[in-house]
Image (cartoon, grey):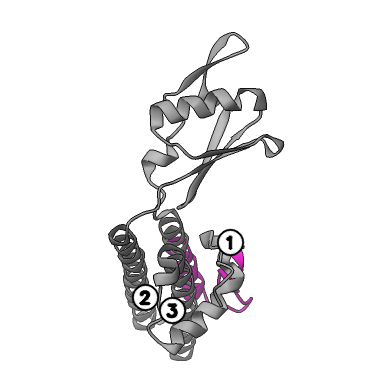
Amino acid sequence: MLEELYFKRKDDLDSYSDAFESRVRDRFDIFVSEARSAGTSDENKQILYGLRMRVNGKERRVTDLAEAFVTMTHIDIRMLNTDAMSDLAKIIKEEKGFSKIDMMPEDQLMRITLPKPSLEQKLELNDFVENRLTNFKKNIMGVKAQTGQQIKAGLDKEYIQPADATKAGKNIEKISEHYVLRAKMLTLLKQKSILKGQFTFKSEEEKAIFRKAKPFASVMEFVEEENEE
C-alpha cells in the first residue's frame, strides 16, 4: 500500500529529478515510519523481552515462542503453542501489570487492551506527529536546495542546457508537491486516530485532503469509528 503513495516516475525523467525523487522518497519512508509508530512505546514493543516460561517441562524464552505487534490501542501477541497461552497471559498480568487480556486461540492470538491515554497525552502525541510533518517539509527544502546547486553547477559548466534545467526544476517542484501532499494525508489520518471525536479539521482543504487519504488508512493503521462520516 505504501508504494502506491510514491511518485510515479516517467521514462523521460531527467537525472537530476530522478536523483531528487530517490532522496525524497527515502525521507518519506522515514516520516511514515516515525508517524506510524507514534504512540507505540518502546516498552510495549519489548513486552516479551526477559520473560521466561516452562513449556513441556522445559524453561524457554518467551521471545522464542511468541511475537508481539503493537498499536496505539492494543498489543497483539501471536503464539503457535495455544496450550501455553493461558500461562503466558498469567505471566504478563503478574510481571507487566496488564489486566485486560482477551484470548483468541483459534487465531493463535491474545490481545492486550492498553489503558486509554489522557487528553494531555493525546495532544502531545498529536503535536509530535505535526512536528514530524514539519521536519519532513524542511528535509525536502534541504534536498531541493542541494539539487538546485547541482543544476546551477551543470549550467555553469555547460553540462546541461537552460531548457533542460527549466524542465528539471518543474519536475522537482512536482515531486515536492506530490510528497508533501501525501505526508499531509497520512498526518491527518494519524491525528484523527489519536484524537478521535476530539479531532477537528482546520479548513475545508484539510477535509478534502482527508477524503483523499482514506484509501490509504492501512498505512497508518487507521480505523474509522462507525459513527464518523
* Predominant secondary structure, magenta span: helix
Question: What type is the residue that disc 2 sits on?
Answer: Lys
Using the rendered image of the protein, determine whether residue 129 is visible from the camera's viewpoint.
yes
* Residue behind mark 3: 159
Using the rendered image of the protein, determine whether residue 169 is visible from the camera's viewpoint.
no
Question: What type is the residue that disc 1 sits on?
Answer: Ser
Q: Earlier in the sequence, mark 2 or mark 1?
A: 2
Is residue 55 rendered to the left or right of residue 29? right
Question: What type is the residue that disc 3 sits on?
Answer: Tyr
Farthest residue, direction top:
57
Q: Which residues are magenta?
A: 1-27
- Depth check, front residue: 51 or 91: 91
Q: Position of residue 96 (x, y in %)?
A: 40, 32
Q: Circle 1 sits in a helix, a strand or a loop, which is it?
A: helix
Q: Are marks 3 and 2 in contact (CB under 8 Å)?
A: no
* Residue behind mark 1: 218
